[in-house]
Structures are given as C-alpha cells and as structure tokens.
Image (cartoon, grey):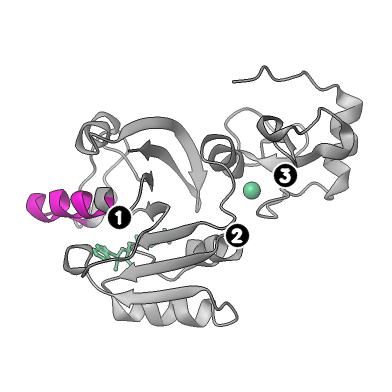
Amino acid sequence: MQKRKSINKKTKEIVFDKTDGRCHVCGKTLFFNAKAGSRERWRVDHILQKSRGGEDLINNYLPICRDCNFLRRNYGSLEGKRILELGCGIGRFTRELALRASNVTAVDMTLGMLERAKDYTADITNITYINSRITDLDALPEFDIVFETITLLHILDEKEYRKSLEIMKSAAPYIFICEHMADSAPVSPYSKLRTFEQYEQDFKPFKLIAYDKNHYCAGDWFPMMLFKK
Ligand SMILES: C[S@@+](CC[C@H](N)C(=O)[O-])C[C@H]1O[C@@H](n2cnc3c(N)ncnc32)[C@H](O)[C@@H]1O
Ligand SMILES: [Zn+2]
C-alpha cells in the first residue's frame, strides 16, 4: 500500500469547504475536528485513487466519512458492481447501494419490509426485490459482492445459519457484513450474537481482508467485516 502523504490544516480546510463539510460519497454531515471513533470523523479522499495514478493535489481531494472510506479503500468503487443484499429490510442501504452500483438484488423474507423498501426506492430502477428466506433462494445470477447488515444475527437456527453462509459464499467473490457481536448487550431474544472470531472462522475459506470493530451505523456501534474468496 502506498504511504499516505500528510496533509496540512489549511489544505484540509479547503477540502472540507468544497462540499460544505459533507462526505462526498454519502452526503453525511462531518465535523472538522471530530475525535477518532466519532461518526462525524472524516478523511481526505483521492477522487482518482492513487493506485490509478491520482495525484496528491488539492483538486484531487474531497472529504469522505469513515464508513465510505472503509469500502472505498478496501473494496474500491461500487460503480458497475452487481450487489446481492440479504435482509434488506425497509431498504435504507438498498437505496444507497443502488445509487452507486450497476444493480442491486435485494432479498427479504418479510413481505411488509419489502413493501416499505419498494416505496422508499420507487424512484430507482436498478433494484430487483425478492421475497424469500436466504436458504430458499433459487439459482442466482453472478454478483460482485454480497452485502448484509444485521440480518445474520436474526438467524437463530444453526443449520439455517450455516446454509445461509454457504449461499453467500457461492454468490460472489466478496462478502460484506455488519453485525452486532457477542460482546455487546443482547438486543432481543430473537437475536443470536456471534463473535468476530466466529464469523472469521465461519466464512472460511474466504479471508477477512478488512474490518472495523468500531463502526457507527444507524445510531449504534457495529463491527463491519469484508471477506474475499
Ligand atoms: C434488523 S433488519 C435489518 C434490515 C436492513 N439490513 C437494515 O440494516 O436496515 C433484518 C431483516 O432481515 C430479514 N431477515 C431475517 N432473517 C432472514 C432470512 N433468513 N432470510 C431473509 N431475510 C431475513 C428480516 O425480515 C428483516 O427485514
Ligand atoms: Zn460517507
């Protein structure tokens, strides 16, 4: 990995003002002097990444939040990517993914959730919704990445959990998960909190290529993990 050039305060101020203090990927409001670990924490991002010849120049910089930075640095851009989202719920991530990727296939077993997701994304045309349990999915087309947030912890049955993981592994070469872990307080009797190490073990032979144990999302802290085949 290329070494990061240190960027002085004046340059940071100019970069921050370019977007009025918002993340250039998701639009989240950032705080200039946010502390490490805070959700308003930000970094200077390269518009054209250094690995593609992007330069350390002010006109190649924009502010990025820590969450978007994680995916961008560790996975790259979602542009042109086909995403399988499992347990999409009311579509809050489906919308963000579809705005950036080529297409999203969003799966949820709860019809009421899918109806709300369809309403919420009615203006977007690159989403296919499927009403199914993960384990009941029929032959799927190829995807570039499987994405899920707070869905695996709702799969209590061990056999169903294992089968769901196998389906995820066969669907794409990358898997992104964001889950509460066993060291947080239990969220409800309908949840099974697993450990970071257990997910790492259970997703084998996929390798854990990036993680953030302190990811802030939807008003709470979650670890996020990115696996590669
Ligand atoms: C806590 S919600 C999370 C929704 C969304 N990922 C988010 O973060 O906003 C979990 C969702 O997963 C769905 N779900 C749970 N187990 C599932 C399974 N085995 N197959 C498909 N969907 C499932 C539920 O219906 C629910 O909509
Ligand atoms: Zn962002």
- Please tell me which residue is depicted at 38% across the width and 76% down the height of the picture: 129
Please tell me which residue lies in front, 181 or 86.
86
- Please tell me which residue is depicted at 88% across the width and 44% down the height of the picture: 17
Q: What amino acid is found at the position of numbered circle 3 in the picture?
A: Leu
Q: Is residue 86 magenta?
A: no
Secondary structure character of the magenta stretch overall: helix
Q: Which mark is residue 30?
A: 3
Question: Mark 1 = which residue?
Answer: 171
Q: As drawn, is 11 to the left or to the right of 119?
A: right
Question: Mark 2 = which residue?
Answer: 100
Locate residue 130, reporting x and y percent.
32, 75
Please tell me which residue lies in front, 129 or 14.
129
Above or below — where is 161 with respect to 95?
above
Ligand 1, seen in the image, is in the quarter at: bottom left
Cα distance, mark 3 to mark 1? 35 Å
Q: What amino acid is found at the position of numbered circle 2 in the picture?
A: Arg
